[in-house]
């Protein structure tokens, strides 16, 4: 496991104070569904601020969020929010708001009715005012009286966020909240979540998109195949991802000569002549890509194509797990 301790974060981003007591805690948590181990011995602590839960499909992100919401009990270990175990403890919903991945919304209701129903379920003193405030936060006032079934996916997402926020929870859990949002909606939602994090709320959102997490999260928890692969400051994790070895396929006027030239570079770990071209394993992505064109020019070799061949998130995660 690549364990990265949360490090000091420059002033540009708001990070949880190191002394802040953990609000959310996983202590050696395992959860299995029948034979499938969805979460495997995960320990983590989260405090106020925005945390991204990053992982490929099937990594265990939804299971982690459902354990926190009290929908699932840990098979082993303990999960707590503010010191309380959420399982079979509905009062936890005074503290927690959940935006599920699936649309668990009555589509014949309008957003206003849906959010108001959520406010009433929370027995808020003024449910109407709370619903209006939540709809305003997600910029849904104008469309609030249309049935949800007429909404785009992004609007449905925002209606779910309003319902989860209506009681101003201390902890907000969001499962792939940006799915289906257009760039403007996404930017607005990011601003809203960032603002809530800065105002002391503990926000945990799942995503399989590195850029989303990078733009929003103060800290990142990377899960792969049910295990915690890395955790801490997003910059450190980003650096680990960009400094990992990268594989490129190159096509040139003289692949054999190019192999000889590249092997002299400290940024290159290995080369292989294949029927498709020259496969290069670079130890440092930045140095390799910066110097490649010049090396070819100096050697009189024409560079025809540079194809990164292991850029999938899965390969990034595989590297983090194996590192
Ligand atoms: N109810 C279930 N019964 C059996 N297996 C399940 C169940 N729910 C999830 N799993 C399995 O547990 C593992 C983790 O699933 P989970 O939904 O938590 O991952 P995820 O990271 O949220 O993935 P995705 O991004 O695709 O939603 C997967 O292998 C999944 O197939």
Image (tube, rainbow, N blue to C red):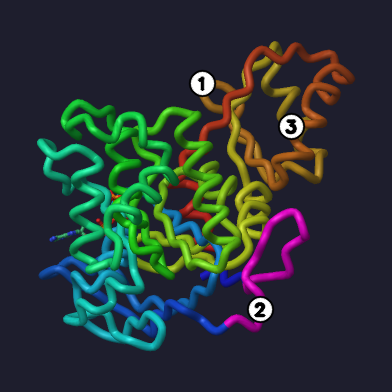
For disc 1, the marked residue is: 276
On screen, residue 9 above or below 106? below
Q: Quadrant of residue 277?
A: top right
On screen, residue 157 above or below 152? below
On screen, residue 68 above or below 88? above
For disc 2, the marked residue is: 18
In this orientation, which residue lies closer to the viewer: 3 or 274? 3
Total labels: the figure holds 3
Q: Which residues are magenta?
A: 5-20
Mark number, residue 289? 3
User: Residue 128 appears at what percent x and percent y?
Assistant: 28, 53
Give the label, 3 or 2, closer to the camera. 2
Q: Residue furthest right?
A: 298
Mark 2 or 1 closer to N-term? 2
The C terminus appears in which quarter of the rendering?
bottom right
Secondary structure under the numbered disc 2 in the rendered image: loop
User: Residue 294 appears at what percent x and percent y?
Assistant: 85, 23
Q: Quadrant of residue 40?
A: bottom left
Mark 1 or 3 closer to N-term? 1
Secondary structure under the numbered disc 3 in the rendered image: helix
> Relative to residue 173, is residue 189 drawn left or right?
right
* Classed neighbour count for the residue bearing mark 1: other residues with Cα under 10 Å, few (<14), some (14–19), many (≥20): few
* Dominant secondary-structure state across the stretch colored magenta: loop
Residue 164 within the magenta-colored segment of the rendering: no
User: Residue 144 appears at what percent x and percent y?
Assistant: 28, 35
Real-space Cα distance between discs 2 and 1? Answer: 51 Å
């Amino acid at each position: 496991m690549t364990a990265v301790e949360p490090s000091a974060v420059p002033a540009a981003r708001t990070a949880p104070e190191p002394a802040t007591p953990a609000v959310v805690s996983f202590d050696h948590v395992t959860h299995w569904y029948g034979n499938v181990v969805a979460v495997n011995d995960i320990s983590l602590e989260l405090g106020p601020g925005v945390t991204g839960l990053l992982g490929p499909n099937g990594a265990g992100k939804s299971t982690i969020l459902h354990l926190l919401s009290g929908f699932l009990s840990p098979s082993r270990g303990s999960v707590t929010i503010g010191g309380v175990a959420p399982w079979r403890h509905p009062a936890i919903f005074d503290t927690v708001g959940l935006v599920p991945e699936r649309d668990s919304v009555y589509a014949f209701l309008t957003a206003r009715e849906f959010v108001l129903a959520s406010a009433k379920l929370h027995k808020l003193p003024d449910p109407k005012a709370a619903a209006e405030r939540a709809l305003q936060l997600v910029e849904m006032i104008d469309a609030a009286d249309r049935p949800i079934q007429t909404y785009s996916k992004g609007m449905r997402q925002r209606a779910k966020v309003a319902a989860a926020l209506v009681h101003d929870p201390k902890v907000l859990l969001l499962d792939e909240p940006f799915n289906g949002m257009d760039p403007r909606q996404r930017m607005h939602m990011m601003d809203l979540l960032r603002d809530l994090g800065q105002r002391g709320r503990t926000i945990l959102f799942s995503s399989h998109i590195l850029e989303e997490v990078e733009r929003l999260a103060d800290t990142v928890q990377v899960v792969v195949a049910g295990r915690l692969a890395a955790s801490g400051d997003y910059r450190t994790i980003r650096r680990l991802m960009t400094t990992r070895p990268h594989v490129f396929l190159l096509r040139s006027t003289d692949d054999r000569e190019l192999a000889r030239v590249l092997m002299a570079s400290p940024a290159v770990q290995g080369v292989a002549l294949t029927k498709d071209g020259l496969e290069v394993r670079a130890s440092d992505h930045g140095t390799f890509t910066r110097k490649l064109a010049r090396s070819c020019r100096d050697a009189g070799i024409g560079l025809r194509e540079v194809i990164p061949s292991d850029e999938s998130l899965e390969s990034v995660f595989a590297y983090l797990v194996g590192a």
